[in-house]
Image (tube, rainbow, N blue to C red):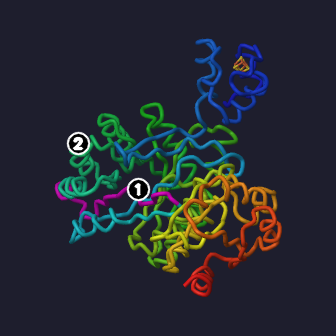
Amino acid sequence: MALTGLDIFKQLPKKNCKECGAPTCLAFAMSLAAGKVALDLCPYVSEEAKENLGAAAAPPIRLVTMGVGETALTLGDETVIFRHDKTFCHPTVFAIEVNDTAKDLTAKIAKINDLKVERVGQQLGVNAIAVINASKDAATYKDVVGKIAALTQLPLILVSDNVAALEAALPGVAAKKPLVYAATAANYEKVVELAKANACPVAVKGTNLADTVELVEKIAPLYKELVIDTGSRATSQVLADQTQIRRLSVKKKFRPLGYPTMTFTESADPREEVIQASVYVAKFAGIVVLKADEKSQILPLMAWRQNVYTDPQKPIAVEAKIYEIGAVTASSPVYICTNFALTYFAVEGEVAGSKIPGYILPVDTDGTSVLTSWASGKFSADSITEFLESSGIKAKINHTTCVLPGYTAVLSGKLKEKSGWTVMVGPQEAAGIPAFAKAHFA
Ligand code: SF4
C-alpha cells in the first residue's frame, strides 16, 4: 500500500534545513508521497529510512531503457497526469513495423532511417523499428533481425508470439538492447527468462487491463524491466486503458501499473492511423508502433509529440542575437521578433523564402510569443531599443530602419521615439513577409 505523507514524514530527519528544496521536512514528505520528488534530494535520510521508504521513493512509473548509445531510448519516469502540472519527461517512442517477410528490406529500412526533420531547432525522428515475425519461422526471423540490426542504428522491438523465434533472434542483437515483445500468460516464464538472461527489457501483453495487472503481478517479482501492453486495439479502449494506467500509477501509486506503456495502431486507413497515434501520444503512450512510414504521416505526429512534450514552463527559445539569413549586405532589412522558437523559425523560413536576404533580431522575451510578450511588457519599445543598441546590428548596416511585427503596430511610435530608428510595421503573420519584402526591399 502506498505510504502517506505523514508516514514518510515520521521517517525523515526533521531538520527543516531546506537543502532538499522544500521549505520543511513535512512539505518534502508530501511531495515525495505525490511522486513529485526523489528521496535522494535529502542528504540526511538514514539507511534504515531509505529501506523503509523504498517503495514511496521509487518513481510512480519505472524508468526503462532500450537501445544503446546515441539512439538509446528512455521510457516512463513520468510523475504527473496533466502536462501543465509540471511537464511530461520522456516523449512517446514512434516505432515503425517491418515484417520479416518484407521484400526490399534495404530500401524499407533506409526509408525509415530517413524519417526525420528539424523543427524549431530540434532534430525529430522516428525512434525504433518493430520487427514482426510474420513468417512465424524462427530461422527467417533470426536472419531478418540480424540484417535489420546491421542496416540501422535505431533500437529494435522483437515482436513474435513464437518463443523459438525470440530465442533464435535475440542473442545476436542483445548487445543493442532491443525490447522483447511479448510475455503473455501462456509464455511468460520462458520469455522473461530469455529477456533477463540477455539484459533486455520485455513487454508484458495482457488481453485487457485487469488481466494485464494479474500478469504483471506474476512477472514483477522475477524481473522489473517491463513495458505494459493491455492488448486493447480499439482507439477508445486504448485511450481508457492508458488513462486508467496513468491515474492509478501516479495518483494511487498502484505498482502493477507503474511501468511505461506501449500500443499498436491498427487502422488500415492511413489518415485514421495518424489520428489514432495522435490520441495515444496525447494520452500517455510510452511507445506507439505504427504501420505508417510516409513522411506525410509521420511529420505531423512528430510535431504533435514535440508540442505535448515541451515543458510548458520553459518555452523553446532561441538565443537573442543577430541572425543573418541569406547573403546579407549593409542595406539588408532588419526584422524584429521575439525569441520564442516557433516565432523565430516561422520568421526565418519566410525571410529565407522571400529570397531577399535580411537580418532577424529576436528580442529576449523568455521564449514567449509576440502577443504574449507584448501583453506582459517583455516586448516593449524599451526592450527592443535596448536590443537594437546592444546586439551590434548598427555596425553591420548602413541604415536605421527596422520591421516590427504587425500585431504590435501600437509600439511603433514609441519605438521610433526611444530608438531614433525608422519603424516599418510589417505583416501580422510571418507568411506575409515574402510579399512585404518584395514590395519594400526588392
Ligand atoms: S533536506 Fe531532509 S532534513 Fe532538510 S528539510 Fe529536506 S527533508 Fe528535511
Q: Quadrant of residue 15?
A: top right
Q: Nearer the viewer, residue 181 or 410?
A: 410
Q: Nearer the viewer, residue 235 or 206?
A: 235
Q: Position of residue 397 (x, y in %)?
A: 57, 66
| Sequence order check, earlier mark of 2 and 1 | 1
Q: CA distance from mark 2 to mark 1?
A: 22 Å
Magenta-colored span: 121-140
Q: Is residue 374 visible?
A: yes
Q: Position of residue 250 (x, y in %)?
A: 65, 42
Q: What residue is pinned by disc 2?
A: 171
| 424 over 221 or under it: above or below | below
Amino acid type at circle 1 is Asn
Q: Residue 406 in magenta?
A: no
Name of the residue lying farthest toward the front: 398
Q: Residue at image x 71%, y 13%? A: 13
Amino acid type at circle 2 is Pro
Q: Residue at image x 65%, y 52%? A: 390
| Quadrant of the rendering where the C terminus is positioned | bottom right
Q: Position of residue 176 (x, y in %)?
A: 29, 44
Residue 7 in the figure: left or right of residue 202: right
**How dense is the environment of label 2, judged by Cα within 10 Å: few (below 14), some, or many (20 and up)?**
some
Q: What residue is pinned by disc 1?
A: 127
